[in-house]
Structures are given as C-alpha cells and as structure tokens.
Amino acid sequence: MKKRILVFCEQRDGEIANVSLELLGIATQLASTSNQEVCAMIGGYNISNLPKTLVEYGADIVYIADDKNLEHYLTEQYAQAISHIIKTCAPNIVLFPATSIGRDLAPRLSARLHTGLTADCTKLEVDEEGSLFMTRPAFGGNLFATIICPNHKPQMSTVRPGVMQKNQPDSNRKGEVIDVKVPFDGTKFAVKLVEEKIEKSTEPPIEGAKILVSVGRGMEKNIDQVREFADRIGGVVGCSRAVVDGGILPQCKQVGQTGKTVRPQLYLALGISGAVQHLAGMSDSEFIVAINKDKEATIFGIAQLGVVGDASAILPHLIKQIEMMK
Amino acid sequence: MANFKYDLFNKMIEEFALNEVKPYAAEVDEKEEFPYYTVEKMAKLGLMGIIVPKQYGGMGGDYKMYIKAVEELAKYCATTSVILSAHESLCVAPIMEYGTEEQKQKYLPKLASGEWLGAFGLTEPNAGTDANNQTTVAVPNENGDYVLNGSKIFITNAGPAHVYFITAVVGRNPKGVECASFIVESDMPGFSVGKKEKKMGIRGSSTCELIFQNCVVPAGNLVGKPGEGFKLAMKALDGGRIGIAAQALGIAEGALRETIAYTKERKQFKRSISAFQNTQFVLADLKTKIEAARGLVEKAVDAKQAKSRDISLYAAMAKLFCAETAMEVTTKAVQLHGGYGYTREYPVERMMRDAKITEIYEGTSEVQRMVISGVILK
Amino acid sequence: MKIAVCIKQVPKTTEIRIDPVTNTLIRDGIPSIINPDDKSALEVALRIKEQTGAEIHVVCMGPGQAEIALREALAMGADEAYLVTDRAFAGSDTLATSTIIADALKYVGFDYIIAGRQAIDGDTAQVGPQIAEHLGIPQITYCADFNYDKQNNVFKVKRQLEDRYQILSVAGPALFTVLSSSITPRYMNVADIIAQDDKELHILTYADLQCNTEHIGLKGSPTKVKSTFTKQYNSDKQLVDTTPEEAARIIAELLKAKHII
C-alpha cells in the first residue's frame, strides 16, 4: 500500500476554506515526489456536496464525517473525529491549516497520538522515503528552521495560509469518498457552545489583493489620503502591526508574522520601517516599493525601489502625477 | 532575601511614563490643565505613597525609588513629575518625619493612597528665602487652636491638593520671627485658594495663592514645636530639592533623547545633521553633563537615605547642577532642532520652558550656592 | 479557586536584528520579557482574582534567569511563583515541554489554567493545547474575553476566530489560552514590587516532578531541528533620495511601466 498524506480540510458554513485547497496543492506535489496518496478529511454537518470539490483539487481519497456533533467547530468533537480518521487512514503525514481552528486542533491531536507537530510551516519538502522537511519562521521571522520528525508517525504540521499554491481544479478527476461514522464519546464534551456569530468585515481583504498599499506608524495620520491613493490605483490598504495596535485599522488588515501573509504583484510600503515580523508577511511580494524617512530602514533592504522621504509629502504629488498620466 | 525590587520598579516606571504620560504631555502643557487622570493612575499603582511605611497605608519603599519615579516622569512631562515631587517630598515626607502618631495615622494613609493630594506653603509675596519677612501669622485662640491669617503664593498643587504643610509666624524674638508648621486641610473654615498663576512652563501644574482669613486650625495639627517651623520647612526643602534635581535630570535626558533621534533623521546638505562634528561634540558634552548630574542626584539620595548631616549640601549641589544642566541641554536641544525646535511640533521648546523653573523654585540657583558655600566656609 | 498561569520568558524579538555580515541573529543586549500573550493571561487571572479572591500561581519553565519574569508576575499581583528548571528538560520540543509543564501543573494543583496563545520566539501556539490533552481537561484557545458566572461556577468566554467569534461555556477544570491584543495587562504596582522580595521562589526540578524520561528533553522530543538559516533578501534594488515631486514622478513612472496605471 502507498504511504498517505492526509489533509485536514476546513469548511465554514459549508464552504471549503481556501487554505484547504492550498494544502491539497502542496500535498499533491509532495505525493508525486515520494509516491504517496493524497487523502482529505472533512468534518461538518450536511456537507455531502463537498468531497467532489476536494477530489477536483487533488484528493485521491476523501474521508467525510457528516455528523450533527460537527456542525460547529468544537475542539473535543473534532479531535475525536479526526483521531478516528487518522487511525483508519494510517497516514504518513498529516497537514492542517495554520488557522485558529487548525492550530487549536493539531496540537491537541499531537499529544493524543504522541507524535511531533511543527507549527505554521511556510515550506514543505519530502524525500523519496516520505520523510517530511518542514520549514518555519521563528524569532519573529528572524530565523528559519527546518524541522524533521524522524521516529514518530504521522509527521504532522500546520501550514500557513496564503503560502502554498492550489492545483488547477479538474472536474474529470476521480477519487474515492469514504463515509466515516465516528464513535463519539459524548461524556468528554465539556465545552458548550452558547453562541456563534459571524463578523463580516466591511474592509476589502488584503489576502489575494494584486496591489497592496501598506501603511506603518509613520503614516497613521494620513490614512484617508492613503485610502484615496489606493482607490486610484485599484489597490487595497494594509498595514503594519503598530497601526493595528494604534486602533487605526482592524487586525484583519495586518501584514506580518502575527497578521496575514501576502504576495501581491505590487507592495507599496509607506512609512513602514520593516521589522522582520512585517517582512515575514510580505517578502514574497513580486515587486516592493518602499517610502521611508529613515534611509537606514530595513525595508529598503528588500524593496526593489526605495524612496527616502516623507510618504505624506510624496503622496499628494503622486496622486497628481497619476491623474496627469491617465 | 531576594533583591529584585529596584529592577522591577525601574521597569514599571519606565513603561508607565512612556505609555501613560508621554502621550498627554503636549496636551497638558497646551491646555494648562491639571492631569487628574494621570495622577489617578499613579495613585492606583502606589506611586503617591512610595516612601510611606506600610503601617501607615504606604508602600514601604524608599527615597531611591521615589526619586527614580520623578526622573522618569520628567523625561516626558515635567508637570506630572512636579506634582509627585511636591506631594511626596514637601507634604508626605515632613508629616512622616516630624508628625505626631495621630497626625501620621490621620493623614498618611489617604496621602499615600492618593485619595488626598499634598502641597507645601512657605513662600509669600515678600518672603521667598528670607524667612524674617514672613507675615502669615498663627495665633492661639481660647480653645488652644490656632487662627491663621495671611497668604502664600506660588504654591504647587494648590487647588487639587487637600492637605497643605504650612509655615506661619507664631512669635518674635530679638533675631527675628519664630515659625511653626501646621497641617491645613482645604475644607477648614477660612482657607481658600486664590489666583492661579499663568506660567511659562510646567503649565499643567496648578500654582496658586493660598489665603487664610481667620482660618482655624486645630491644635492637634501643629507639627513639631512652636519655633521649629522654619527648620522643618528647610529640612523638607532639602528633600524637595533632590526631587527637583531629579526632575531637572529627567527633563535633560528627555531633551537629549529627542535631539539624538532628530539629528539622526534630519538632513541638511545631504547628510544627517548627526554626521556633523559640531552636532556630535555638542551631544557628547550634553551626555557627559547629564551623567555627572546623575552622580550628584545619587549622592544626595544616599545622604537622604543614610540620614546624613551632609544632606543639605548634597541636595543643594544636586539641584544646582541638575537645573543648570537641564537649562543648557534643553537650550542646545532647541538649537539643534533649528526652526522646528522653536515650534510646538516638537517637544524640546516645552522642555526648555519647563527646565527654567528648576533653576528657580525650591530655592533659586543663587540660594543653592549660598547653601553650598555656607557649608564649606563654616 | 486556584488558577495556574503559564508564562514564558522570551527575548524581545522586535529588537532582534540580523547581522548583515555574518547573517546571524544578534541576540546580545536584547532584553528578556514576559511573553506578551502570557502577560495577558496573567491579567485575566488577576481580574478573576479581584472578582473571586482566587489564588494565582504562576508557572514558568526556563533557566535560572527566568526568575525575573516570575518576579514581575508577583509584582503584578500573583500569589506564588514556580520555576520549572532542570538540565534534563533541555532540548525539549513543544510536546516534551508540554509533558513537563503538565507534570508541574499537577504538582502545583489548579482549578483552571490560563496560558498565552503563543510565544513570540517560537510562535507555535502548541504547548497550551498539548498541556490540556496531557491533563485530560478541555481547552478553549484564542480567548478574547472572560466572564465568570459565580453562581454556576462556570466560565463564559469569547473565542475569537478569523471571521467570527464563539461564546463558549465550561466548568473547571479547563485550560484557556489568551490573545494579548484584546486584554491589556496591568503595570506592576509599588506594593507588590516591594513585597515580592520577601516571597520565596518555588523551584521544581526533575526530582520533584518525576517526569517520564522517555517523554522529556531532547530524547523525548519527536521533532528535531535539522537546520536553521536566516533569509537573504534580494540585492537587485534601487534607492533614491530626492524631492517629493521627483520621488512621486519616479514612482508614477514605475506604476505605468507595470501597467498599474
């Protein structure tokens, strides 16, 4: 039997999370270099339509646990379901998204199964034997470490959203769907859900934006000007942690180690000094333009075009120039 | 026993000053408003009663911590630092050191918790350092209580304060007046707060006149003996001067820090102005003087903690040198900032205005020189 | 009620820089702090203490130098402090670390455990849930708000997810992990700063905890660090230092060249 890579696919309200598809993408790549099978597991309630999509995006086998107990995300319910599936599937590797659900669940399971877990990986490689090399940032993105889990199975990691590439969906792709009946132990369900509320953000998301205009502490006061500029070039406004801490923009706008990872075609950093924590979230952008008053700012070490100056003084000229060129 | 308290205290006060005091410093100056909210926060952390023993509801800390607090606050906001200094050095400390058991039990817990703010009243329109011109009088009435008449001026914390450590004339002898110290509460009949001064610096600090019109102060509020009042006031000022020295030191440090940051960022002739030797040498001199000033403050604190007889000498030298250093550092800080330094965009002009008072209050620099020469020529 | 709070001492990673010549981390002179999420965890515990009179016991695994972190916790108002330290613990990965801390927590005793979401040096967020599993108690991670219902002895907490929140309730024992962004920790206070010098620091070693040697230290860690490296950024770059007008023109031309305008 082939070794297996099992991907925990997250769904919310019946919608498969983008990161799940990214995980199937990397799993496919890993599987092809080491001759393994890609398995997906998905849990929820009334989700029978979802396995098809997972197959289209690369799953060879889908384990589906469709159960009222899994209607909402609760740690113990999901931990029981997944440990049951892992026992059934006996995977060599298990991948989780490094989302708040994945990062709640995976460590709980690693302790339950007594195996290693590597958090928030940004790069995964595998050798021919199926040994996994998991690379992740540490020390706020200052240092990268490659981690292995040589003597325990499965090898488990959580993978940062926005980093891996999805496969092109193939509607002709065939896969096996296995319906799993989980033998739940309800006596362990100590945590009760009182309420769940979706918070819709009015701000456009920074993930997936082609052009990101990102502001640092130096530009907080000029946020309206920045929005105007971003609108004119079809960009989305993002920011550094300091701006979130200052209450100027919501946390969902934060780029960096503790925020989102982005890789836009153009990243404009205005008044961002470039703490490594920030760089960790945007250094893979295709083209980086940085404006900063301090010519020693670390952001200039990574920007293709660096401009020493006050972004608030440059922006009005820039808006004018753009008008003239249009 | 473990000894982490100074490290932890320093860390706490540095964080507090940076996060809770710095953001409001410009506004406090601009609006000339007493920072009640900040004082409340300081009280919550126990800063208003650092030096008060635990048995009187205080924190059981020492002068070293209290002085560090004044210095750290002054790095960002001289107003906030003088509120603490006047309260703790000039009102809390003399009650603690010279008060009766009843006085300590009555006043210290509420002063230490910050529920009551303290102030000190010595200066009069015609009597600064010259005690013999004191005209506020305290006369015993038939109940043995004292009736105060007269006025005091330039009283820090006047208004917001509830407890005032007041010096008043109780008699005369061939050499001049005899004074006594009294604890006066703001709600005692005949006490009122007069005109508020409009000042050049420390503009959020409330500096007012105190008026006593047949103000009846209970006999139990006499501190020390009649005739000791001037001596007690001078001793309180010895401690107070260390506070003002620390305030001046903090102002100087704050101004230097701002200037270092500015000279690294500001460019002229395509170079950071910190790349010019003139800037470098000025900054080097200022830093050296600041560290020398710190040495004097530390010596004065040691003298105070050891209850040394040298306290007057060291407090005077610390205050003199720190105040003049603060004035020099802030003046040069404004100069290095150029035109921007003269605007309220940058904090150094405020720091320069604030620095000036440290050469004046609690004894001018000239008075400090008199004290110092008086000791060494004895 | 007895609440155990787990804290970690970490380098202030925001101040860590990379030596551009050797391409290694410059760690000299970097101050050590209580991990921010853990400090918020302590804040949550202290608020519950104010409400209920709970006793707060703080547990930190680390070398001897971590004492200052525990001392800071005492100076914020915690009641007791435990340093979990032994050479046998060195080299532990998250699973081995969680095994040791779980043993320490059993030794200390607790009704509830509160920990930070994750540490800024490792950013794994794994140790909390792993401790909960070892102890066989429920966990609620990413907590942004706490309400203690005294009558029913139940905690109601707000769990913050990316696009939603959940209100969850649980009766002890349970482990919570806390987000620092929603809970601002208090300052140390002067009285507790002075009082902590009189308090004894409890030291817990391997001999006290009797951990399973197979599950701790380097040997007991399933994951191994194979290699570490720092990131090299590109060198194909242009830096201009000119007037705002000229700078704007250069950027506008670039945007045009990239077909953005």
Image (cartoon, coloured by chain):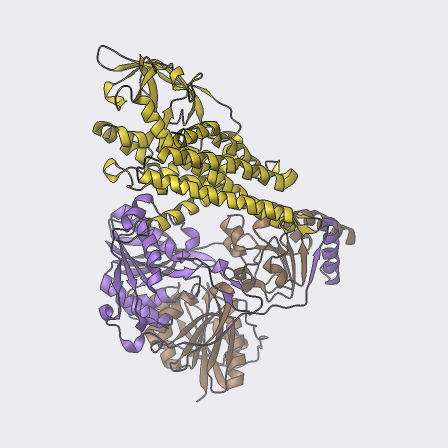
Residue B185, relative to residue A126: is it above or below?
above
Question: Could you tell me which residue is drawn at 75 percent across and 62 percent down?
Answer: C257
Foreground pick, B269 / B281 = B281
Residue C238, relative to residue B109: is it above or below?
below
- Give the chain ID for the purple colour: C
Q: Position of residue B148 (x, y in %)?
A: 32, 14
* Residue with the most extreme top position: B142
Q: In the image, C205: left or right of B64? A: left
Q: Position of residue C4 (x, y in %)?
A: 28, 58
- Give the chain ID for the brown colour: A
Residue A89 in sight here: yes
Residue C61, relative to residue A243: is it above or below?
below
* Residue with the most extreme bottom position: A1
Foreground pick, C123 / B372 = B372
Quadrant holding the C terminus of chain C: bottom right
Foreground pick, B150 / A166 = B150
Q: In the image, B258: left or right of C216? A: right
Q: In the image, B210: left or right of C250? A: left
* Residue with the most extreme front position: B377
**Chain B colour as displayed:** yellow
Foreground pick, C110 / B189 = B189
